[in-house]
Image: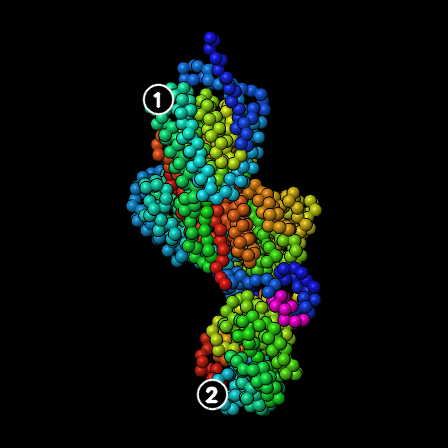
């Protein structure tokens, strides 16, 4: 027998040229912030400061919204075929600069390079391609004979898929004739700023896309600005609720893509090896920083012990570490704050009597890391079974019958995703029909496509992104 | 010979398919447009709203399980029963809304036609709001519209029949259940509608009708965690509507804002779409 | 006896039951968990993106060379051809003695004696096995008697390993018992020779079938399970290899026994071979990273491995001029 180890296979970071500091992207130009205030973006795998970026103040947001308003009449009246061509250009440039985006995303976010390379960036380009084609076909989408853009869209996106969430927001907004003020997350602003360069490169008219970096206050200013007609937010349910309350009584339209606590349900007739992969993919993809993560594993009791044993074995093959290494499966936790949050909720699992099992792997000395972890003996009332952890922590429960699986899966204020594993077609459909979740992955998990609507039931939000249903979020609905 | 004394009726609430008094024991008097006493009607309390939500939650499960064809049949039946009661509806509209005989007839025509229109949508909505999505991979991927759940409805205050139906029907056509707070001053057509519903085949709990004051029970419904959506159609634009919308954020309720148009206009799909959730299902393709 | 509908958890007693009679075997086989094609292929493809660099690559190239079953299975095979093949097997790179010898040469039964003779002339030849394909290879369309005779013939000629084919016709018509018993008989006929059981994945068509055939072969006494004859497309695809390695892994979980695995057919490049070894590393684990448990059936692969090895050694790309043609 040979002991084999993968040699380090680091992706080169030389493809990325970072500036020391970035201004705001308003009216087609990078400008210094009126606030004169900056934050720094840190590589969570090394704690190294990557760059400084501007913090948009109310006045900066106002300038951005004004730019978007100025651009709106011309952009919304541009023939759809012409708008579409701009989106095609953006899509192409994203493909051409794919490696640069992937490397930058991994540096800024901490996700494994293989994910930013194979998932985030290709999907972002695909979203622009898909929506480019809609721009001149909106009257066929089923939203009336003369569909109209809503106006200026204020979009606030999270740090877990920075470029992809930008694409989910910007592509449909532009295709439908809206203009945009986008606020990236404060821990991951860099690919959005690189995207601003792409907008310049594509010759996108000034003011159609404006990117205002900053923290929560900047996002709140975007949401609150009277010149914004449409708010689109992806992030936590708590912030989503405050946004929904804040825009009450205004003319603003709102779509929300919020938290989740997805159940991944494994029946005794599941294709078990693929189910194990599905469990792994469901919770450890992107370090579990996924709103639709399969963070609750529901195992049919008769196979629970065996599946757990196989799952633990499989977990121990996960390669945790340097996100820039092409063979890394699980990268860094995005921020110290998030690491603390994961640590806190997971500790409640210990305190409440669940049994913790973690992969015994070496972790880098610097950076923010959390071992892939599962909790056994979890009950419905444990915090780890109810709250979104947004990290690589899986809560394992069991069930006996399909009815019990449905009840347990649906026993949550969230309703974003669910997985079902079974070789029996009729059972799959029964489960799919009864699960209160916006996306049901049957014998699969964490699959995404621009043609496929994504979004939640209940407190996971409202509105859809992707597909025909996603267009409704950016066209006037009356 | 003395004149016969009319039997005056105290109308009840319609909850879970049954006519019940308000648990508060309260009622209030309703008058015609020219001030003539019409009836005593139950004055719903927050506890009545609470009971109605429980009934709606149970009824919704039954109603959503019915086939779309069956829901369509049931709604057509509602139109049939309304047709047989049209004289009563016309009379009530004349007295409450101060409209001519002709206009009342037209209003009832429109109302019945609207029921028929929505009845036809039950088994077509999935074709319009659903999709087969051509994802770039070996997956069968489809999107289906499903009902949102329990919808609280603040019914229009003036257009007491057509407006009422125009907010109830888009919710129930797709399989939602409803808790309706009627027009405060013009509740009689709603009460008659509840009698229609009771004698048609709409399952218990699907439509619950509360006569009363939305400014009293609206906040309870807006904040109720077991209500999934709220239609503010009948609430005037202003602070109270804003308050209800803000309260609705507590559990991310879907909100339809105050209605400022004319219910006589051809309806859009807005309300049908407002009370559905798109569910997308992925399944691999492979032998 | 296990009563669970689906054999997610296997016990040693389940395997004993399965061997009892045809009905028990059928019951066992039909209760094996299914295989989802898309998920299996996605996992295999994901492992295919593993990046093998520098020291890891050097290590795996030498390992792959040592795992090669250097094969010639042509109607035109002659003593001369087999002799040349054996020379290549012993000294893959005549100019570099640090290159390991391959694991075995693989020939038709009537060429076993030629191979044994050729290997015996080399000092390193003793460490190289001779494998013979048998049982009416590649179609398997002959009576059991002929198949057994074919096997004994090769063993008598000195074959160290027998690569048999299963009766795909019997398998596809649901006669699992026949397939099982035939393997048992061939195993007996092998005596001391190791038995590799070829499933011919391209003819079984579905992953469920490949999984079932793997278990029948292991139950019947296979020392190795092997994908294909090399004569039918859809042979050693990454998904097929992953699936069969999972069967080996699961067998080991239940019995503690290690059954070997041999992909054959369509593995031509170093990259293909690296992917195979990655599958082993991440599925059964490193215990299988040895020629006694993992073989790669190939005819042209060896030269690509040699050229890649030269490139690593010399720091520039090599040419087919610098590898031998045998």
Which numbered marker is on residue B9?
none
Residue tagged 1: B101
Residue A417 screen position, x and y as percent: 53, 48
**B66, A167: nearer the viewer:** B66
**In this rendering, would C140 be left or right of C250?**
left
Quadrant location of the N terminus of chain A in the rendered image: bottom right
Q: Is residue C28 magenta?
A: yes
**A382, A6: nearer the viewer:** A382
Residue B229 screen position, x and y as percent: 49, 35
Q: Residue at x 51, y 39 (%)?
A: B63
Residue C4 screen position, x and y as percent: 65, 59
Visible residue check, residue C250: yes
- What element does badge 1 sit on? helix
Q: State how far apart marks 1 and 2 are (Cα).
A: 103 Å
Which numbered marker is on residue C76?
2
Q: Residue at x 39, y 34 (%)?
A: B114
Which portion, as a residue range, is magenta? C20-29
Q: Nearer the viewer, mark 1 or mark 2?
A: 1
**In this rendering, would C102 be left or right of B136?**
right
Specify the principal SS of the magenta part: helix
């Amino acid at each position: 027998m040979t002991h084999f180890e993968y040699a380090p296979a680091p992706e080169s970071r030389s493809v990325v040229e970072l500036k020391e500091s970035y201004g705001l992207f308003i009216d087609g130009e990078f400008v210094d912030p009126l606030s004169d205030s900056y934050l720094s973006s840190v590589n969570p795998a090394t704690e190294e400061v990557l760059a400084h970026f501007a913090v948009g103040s109310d006045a900066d947001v106002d300038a951005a919204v004004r730019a978007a308003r100025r651009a709106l009449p011309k952009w919304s009246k541009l023939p759809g075929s012409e708008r579409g061509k701009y989106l095609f250009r953006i899509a192409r440039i994203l493909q051409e600069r794919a490696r640069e985006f992937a490397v930058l995303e991994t540096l800024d976010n901490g996700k494994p390079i293989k994910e930013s390379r194979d998932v985030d960036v290709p999907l972002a380009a695909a979203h622009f391609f898909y929506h480019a084609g809609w721009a001149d076909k909106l009257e066929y989408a089923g939203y009336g004979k003369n569909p109209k853009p809503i106006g200026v869209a204020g979009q606030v996106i999270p740090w877990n898929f920075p470029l992809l969430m930008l694409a989910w927001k910007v592509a449909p907004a532009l295709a439908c004739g809206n203009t945009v003020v986008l606020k990236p997350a404060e821990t991951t602003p860099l690919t959005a700023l690189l995207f601003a360069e792409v907008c310049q490169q594509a010759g996108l008219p000034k003011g159609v896309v404006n990117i205002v970096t900053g923290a929560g206050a900047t996002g709140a200013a975007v949401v609150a600005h009277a010149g914004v007609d449409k708010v689109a937010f992806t992030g936590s349910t708590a912030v989503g609720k405050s946004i929904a309350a804040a825009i009450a009584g205004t003319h603003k339209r709102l779509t929300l893509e919020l938290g989740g606590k997805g159940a991944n349900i494994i029946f005794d007739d599941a294709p078990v090896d693929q189910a194990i992969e599905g469990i792994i993919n469901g919770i450890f993809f992107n370090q579990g920083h996924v709103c639709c993560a399969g963070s609750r594993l529901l195992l049919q009791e008769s196979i629970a012990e065996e599946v757990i044993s196989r799952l633990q074995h499989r977990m121990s093959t996960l390669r945790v570490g340097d996100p820039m290494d092409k063979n890394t499966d699980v990268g860094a936790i995005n921020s110290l704050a998030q690491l603390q949050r994961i640590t806190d909720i997971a500790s409640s699992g210990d305190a409440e009597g669940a049994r913790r099992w973690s992969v015994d792997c070496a972790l880098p000395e610097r950076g923010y890391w959390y071992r892939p972890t599962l909790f056994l003996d979890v009950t419905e009332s444990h915090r780890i079974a109810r709250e979104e952890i947004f990290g690589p922590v899986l809560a394992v429960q069991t069930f006996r019958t399909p009815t019990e699986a449905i009840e347990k899966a649906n026993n949550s204020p969230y309703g974003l995703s669910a997985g079902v594993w079974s070789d029996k077609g009729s059972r799959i459909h029964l489960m799919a029909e009864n699960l209160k979740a916006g996306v049901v992955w049957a014998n699969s998990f964490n699959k995404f496509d621009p043609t496929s609507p994504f979004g939640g039931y209940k407190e996971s939000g409202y509105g859809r992104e992707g597909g025909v249903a996603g267009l409704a979020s950016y066209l006037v609905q009356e | 010979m003395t004149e016969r004394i009319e039997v005056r009726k105290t109308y009840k609430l319609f909850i879970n398919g049954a006519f019940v008094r308000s648990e508060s024991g309260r009622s209030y008097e309703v008058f015609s447009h020219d001030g003539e006493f019409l009836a005593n009607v139950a004055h719903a309390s927050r506890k009545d709203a609470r009971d109605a939500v429980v009934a709606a939650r149970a009824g919704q499960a039954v109603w959503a399980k019915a086939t779309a064809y069956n829901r369509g049949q049931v709604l057509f039946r509602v139109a049939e029963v309304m047709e047989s009661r049209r004289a009563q509806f016309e009379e009530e509209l004349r007295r409450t809304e101060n409209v001519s005989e002709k206009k009342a007839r037209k209003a009832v025509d429109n109302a019945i036609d609207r029921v028929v229109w929505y009845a036809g949508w039950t088994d077509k909505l999935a074709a319009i709001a659903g999709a087969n999505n051509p994802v770039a991979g070996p997956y069968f991927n489809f999107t289906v519209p499903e009902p949102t759940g329990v919808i609280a409805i603040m019914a229009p205050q003036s257009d007491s029949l057509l407006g009422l139906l125009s907010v109830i029907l888009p919710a129930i056509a797709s399989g939602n259940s409803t808790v309706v707070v009627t027009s405060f001053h013009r509740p009689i057509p709603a009460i008659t509608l509840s009698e229609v519903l009771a004698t048609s085949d709409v399952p218990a709990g699907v439509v619950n009708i509360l006569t009363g004051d939305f400014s009293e029970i609206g906040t309870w419904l807006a904040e109720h965690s077991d209500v999934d959506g709220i239609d503010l159609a009948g609430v005037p634009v202003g602070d109270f509507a804003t308050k209800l919308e803000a309260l609705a954020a507590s559990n991310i309720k879907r909100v339809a804002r105050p209605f400022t148009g004319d219910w006589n206009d051809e309806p859009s799909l807005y309300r049908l779409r407002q009370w559905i959730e798109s569910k997308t299902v992925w399944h691999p393709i492979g032998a | 006896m296990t009563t669970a509908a689906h054999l997610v958890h296997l016990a040693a007693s389940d395997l004993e039951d399965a061997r009892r009679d045809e009905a028990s075997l059928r019951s066992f086989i039909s209760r094996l968990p299914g295989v989802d094609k898309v998920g299996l292929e996605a996992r295999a493809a994901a492992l295919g993106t593993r990046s093998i660099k520098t020291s890891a690559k050097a290590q795996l190239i030498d390992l792959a060379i040592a795992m090669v079953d250097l094969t010639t299975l042509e109607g035109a095979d002659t003593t001369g051809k087999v002799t040349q093949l054996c020379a290549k097997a012993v000294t893959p790179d005549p100019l570099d003695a640090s290159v390991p010898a391959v694991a075995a040469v693989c020939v038709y039964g009537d060429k076993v004696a030629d191979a044994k003779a050729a290997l015996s002339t080399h000092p390193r030849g003793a460490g190289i096995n001779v494998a013979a394909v048998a049982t009416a290879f590649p179609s398997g369309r002959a009576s059991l008697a002929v198949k057994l005779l074919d096997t004994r013939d090769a063993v008598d000629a000195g074959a160290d390993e027998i690569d048999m084919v299963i009766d795909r016709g019997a398998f596809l018509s649901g006669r699992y018992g026949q397939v099982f018993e035939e393997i048992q008989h061939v195993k007996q006929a092998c005596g001391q020779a190791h038995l590799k059981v070829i499933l011919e994945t391209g003819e079984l068509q579905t992953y469920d079938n490949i999984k079932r055939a793997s278990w029948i072969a292991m139950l019947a006494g296979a020392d190795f399970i092997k994908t294909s004859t090399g004569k039918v497309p859809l042979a050693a695809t990454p998904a097929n290899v992953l699936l069969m390695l999972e069967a080996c892994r699961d067998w080991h979980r239940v019995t503690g026994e290690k059954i070997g695995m041999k992909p054959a057919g369509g593995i031509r490049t170093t990259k293909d071979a690296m992917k195979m070894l990655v599958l082993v590393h991440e599925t059964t684990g490193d215990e299988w990273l040895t020629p006694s448990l993992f073989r790669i059936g190939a005819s042209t692969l060896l030269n690509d491995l040699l050229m890649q090895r030269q490139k690593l050694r010399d720091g520039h790309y090599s040419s087919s001029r610098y590898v031998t043609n045998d």
